[in-house]
Image (cartoon, rainbow, N blue to C red):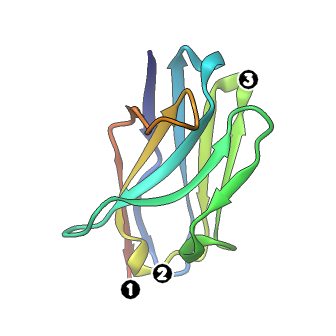
Amino acid sequence: QVQLVESGGGLVQTGGSLRLSCAASGRTSSLYNMAWFRQAPGKEREFVGDIRWSGGSTYYTDSVKGRFTIFRDNAKNTVYLQMNSLKPEDTAVYYCAARMDMTVLYNYWGQGTQVTVSS
C-alpha cells in the first residue's frame, strides 16, 4: 500500500506560479511512477504529466509543456509539480497518483488540491 498526501494549492493570478507537493509513504520502493492529473468543473479528469520513480524521466501533456515541471526528491519520497505561467484554463483540482507497474492503472491517489487561476 502507498499513501499520498498533497499540498500547495491556492489562488494565483494569470502568469503566476505555484508548486504542488505529493508526499508518498508506505511501499514507495515498489513504485513504478507517479503522475499528476487534474479535473476542472464539469470536465473529465485529465492527465498532466508523470515521472519515473527510478531514473526520473518525465512526460507531459502538450497543454503544459514548457510551463509545468515534475521533479522528485527521493530522500523525502516527495514529487513536486512546479507550475509557471499559469492560465485560467489551468484552474482545477489537482491529484497525484501512483502505480507499481506500467501495465496497471493508477491505483493510489491523493486527496486533491484546488488550484485557481484568476484572470
Going 62% across and 19% down the picture, which residue do you hit?
Answer: 30
Q: Nearer the viewer, residue 108 or 89?
A: 108
The circle drawn on residue 14 is 2
User: What amino acid type is highlighted by mark number 3?
Assistant: Ala
- Looking at the figure, which quarter contains the N terminus? top left
- Kindly identify the amino acid type of the residue bearing the numbered disc 1: Ser
Which residue is outermost to the front? 103
The residue lying at 67 percent from left, 25 percent from top is 76
Q: Is residue 23 left or right of residue 68?
A: left
Local SS, label 3: helix
Question: Which SS class for mark 2?
Answer: loop
**Are the residues tagged 2 and 1 within 8 Å (C-beta)?**
yes
Q: Residue furthest left?
A: 42
The residue under label 3 is 75
Label 3, label 1: how many angstroms apart (C-alpha)?
Answer: 37 Å
Between discs 2 and 3, the one toward the N terminus: 2
User: Residue 45's spot in the image, x, y percent?
Assistant: 33, 59
Q: Whole-percent x and y of residue 102?
A: 58, 37
